[in-house]
Amino acid sequence: MKAWSIAVPALAITALAMVPQDPNSADPSLVDQSAVASISELNYINLQGTSVNVPARSVVEIRFLDDAGEHIRLELLYENGDYSLLTVQGFHLLRNNGSAREVRLVRGKSTRMRFPRLP
């Protein structure tokens, strides 16, 4: 009876150790945070200090890459497959400045950029 009391817990620990683990599940920093917002325009200030307006009518996703150093890095994905990578000083998401559209907003890392794959 003493052998069973030692063998059963040892088998249970061995069985748990053999269960596959997802290495990314424990690290929340590897998961992109996202939300959908209705915006009409993206206004950003480029590195030269000029304000630039981008209407949201063709933008489907705006990605904020939060590990770009002292500046802000944005990726814009457009409905027709176009792509923009911007390094900016600041940006504004305007909601009531014309025709609004649902745009996916994502906060992620540079290692998970959406730069299109080239053939």
Image (cartoon, rainbow, N blue to C red):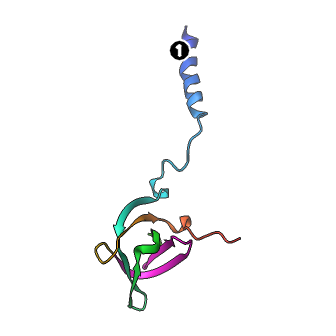
Identify which residue, 81 or 35, lies in the foreground: 81
- Name the kind of residue labelled 1 in the image: Ser
The x and y percentages for residue 83 are: 54, 75
User: Label 1: how many residues lie within 10 Å, few (<14), some (14-19) or many (20+)?
Assistant: few
Of the 4 image quadrants, the one containing the C terminus is bottom right
The x and y percentages for residue 47 are: 43, 88
Range drawn in magenta: 70-93
74 in the magenta segment: yes
Quarter of the figure with residue 49: bottom left
The x and y percentages for residue 99 are: 34, 74
Q: Is residue 31 above or below residue 12?
A: below
The residue located at (61%, 33%) in the rendering is 18
Identify which residue, 66 or 94, lies in the foreground: 94
Identify which residue, 67 or 41, lies in the foreground: 41
Residue 69 visible in the snapshot: no
Element under disc 1: helix
Residue 27 visible in the snapshot: yes
Query: For the stretch drawn in magenta, what is the main secondary structure?
Result: strand
Q: Quick check: 53 left or right of 21?
A: left
Outermost residue to the left: 96
The residue carrying mark 1 is 5
Quarter of the figure with residue 19: top right
Q: Is residue 23 above or below residue 77?
A: above
22 in the magenta segment: no
